[in-house]
Image (tube, grey):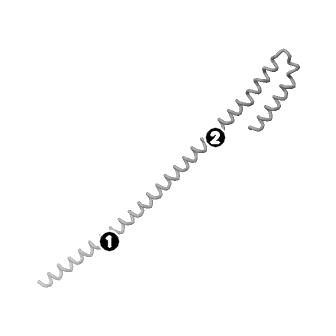
Amino acid sequence: MIMNHTQTVEELERITENYITFFIVFDILFFVMVFISVLLLIRFFKSKKSLKDSNEYLVYTIRGQEEERARIARELHDTIAQDLRYCKNLLEKDETAVNISEAVQILEKSLSQVRLIS
């Protein structure tokens, strides 16, 4: 009977050791998976923030380009286009010979403005 109890106790101890080993291994694997998941989440949020920052940079760059184009268009319209219209009106008048020197000066001014803008 003692032998039977001893075997039962030994068997119970073995089963208990197996369960303890199983749960230790399970806990280690679980914490490793949680750790890896946290690292992946951190990496994901960093890349998402980086992408957001790069998108904001692109938006600011595009906005700056659009503002520069609008400024150039205003410059062309407000200065050069008006000067050319004025030259055209001068040359269409009856006393064209008198207005040629003024038209040449305006055209030279417009040419230097185009160079400055470009």
Rendered residue at 75%/23% (across/down): 85
Front residue of 33 and 57: 57
Image quarter in which the N terminus is found: bottom left
| Residue 103 percent coordinates (x, y) | 83, 25
| Residue 25 percent coordinates (x, y) | 33, 70
Image quarter in which the C terminus is found: top right
Ranked by sequence position, the earlier of labels 2 and 1 is 1
Horizontal relation, residue 24 to residue 99: left or right: left
Report, in whole angstroms, how far the alpha carbon at label 2 lies from the one at label 1: 61 Å
Q: Residues within 10 Å of mark 2 (few under 14, many from 20)?
A: few
Q: Residues within 10 Å of mark 1 (few under 14, many from 20)?
A: few
Q: How many marks?
A: 2
Residue, disc 1: 24
Q: Quadrant of residue 61?
A: top right
Front residue of 41 and 82: 82
What amino acid is found at the position of numbered circle 2 in the picture? Gln
Q: Quadrant of residue 24?
A: bottom left
Rendered residue at 15%/84% (across/down): 3
Residue, disc 2: 65
Horizontal relation, residue 81 to residue 97: left or right: left
What amino acid is found at the position of numbered circle 1 in the picture? Ile
Instruction: Relative to 44, say whether 60 is above or below.
Output: above
Front residue of 75 and 26: 75
Rendered residue at 65%/35% (across/down): 70
| Residue 67 percent coordinates (x, y) | 63, 39
Rendered residue at 39%/66% (across/down): 32
| Residue 77 percent coordinates (x, y) | 70, 29
Front residue of 22 and 33: 33
Instruction: Relative to 74, say whether 20 is above or below.
Output: below
